Image (cartoon, helix red, strand yellow):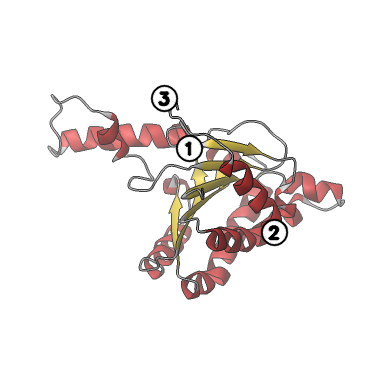
Amino acid sequence: MVPVHVSIIMDGNGRWAKLRNKERSFGHREGAERIKDCLEAAGEAGVKYLSLYTFSEENWNRPKEEVNGLMELFVNTLDTKIDNLKKNDVRLLIFGNRSRLSQKMQDSIAAAEKYTEDCKALTLMIMFSYSGKWDIVQAVNRYRQDIVDGKVDASQELDIAGYEKYISTAGIPAPDLLIRTGGELRISNYMLWQCAYSEFYFTDILWPDFRKTEFQKALDSFKNRQRRYGEIH
């Protein structure tokens, strides 16, 4: 059994750098290189969707120098890797609160998504300036706006399927498998709605050391799970 959608909370860049007496930025740069490894492993396994939690809304509270460095790294990675994604038929989608990003970054994101929109082999989703609580609230606000605009009937009860049309990842399967690196045992305000029935896999491996072999270990663990969704089998 291969998961359709694998999601990863990429944790441990700073600690990885500290163990090597380096600045945190060194760990972030090394961590960015692991995306290629996971894309290759996902593609070889038959995974169709890979989502990566790269920068949370809470991360905006980090020191300004580190935040600025992460913004620069994001743009540079986008600029240097986008052609390779296109070449390998990988569609890129980026989810998060874009209102907090500079206009230049927003334009770069829109252009990258447009450039790869016809790719079909695999979809890579970057969760940037994202949080699960933000996603739930923005969905409610979008629904309220549709009421104001007369697009929906406020007298009709909103059900689960109707609500899911408003979350940021609407139309994309929920993660079957959620991986977290770095040894922490929590999901840190990530895809709170979408991960209701995801299988979790936690590893002590720090993200910059997470290679294709580690990805495969997570897939092997998933194969042994029984997904009952509250039923009895």
Number of marks in the image? 3
Q: CA distance from mark 1 to mark 2?
A: 25 Å
Q: Nearer the viewer, residue 171 or 45?
A: 45
Q: Position of residue 199 (x, y in %)?
A: 54, 36
Instruction: Give me the residue at 31% from left, 37% from top.
Output: 164
Foreground label between 3 and 1: 3
Q: CA distance from mark 3 to mark 1?
A: 23 Å
Residue underneath mark 2: 29
Q: Disc 1 residue type?
A: Met
At label 3, counting other C-alpha atoms closer than 10 Å, the crowd grade (few under 14, some 14-19, many 20 or more) is few
| Corner quadrant of residue 233 | top left
Q: Nearer the viewer, residue 172 or 58?
A: 172
Residue 27 falls left or right of residue 42: right
Foreground label between 2 and 3: 3
Helix, strand or loop at mark 1: loop
Q: Which mark is residue 191?
A: 1
Viewer can see residue 66: yes
At label 1, counting other C-alpha atoms closer than 10 Å, the crowd grade (few under 14, some 14-19, many 20 or more) is many
Residue underneath mark 3: 231
Q: CA distance from mark 2 to mark 3?
A: 44 Å
Instruction: Give me the residue at 83% from left, 47% from top.
Output: 18
Q: Nearer the viewer, residue 224 or 173?
A: 224
Residue 123, placed above or below residue 54: below
Q: Are the residues at dot 1 and dot 2 in contact (C-beta closer than 8 Å)?
A: no
Helix, strand or loop at mark 3: loop
Q: Position of residue 209 (x, y in %)?
A: 75, 53
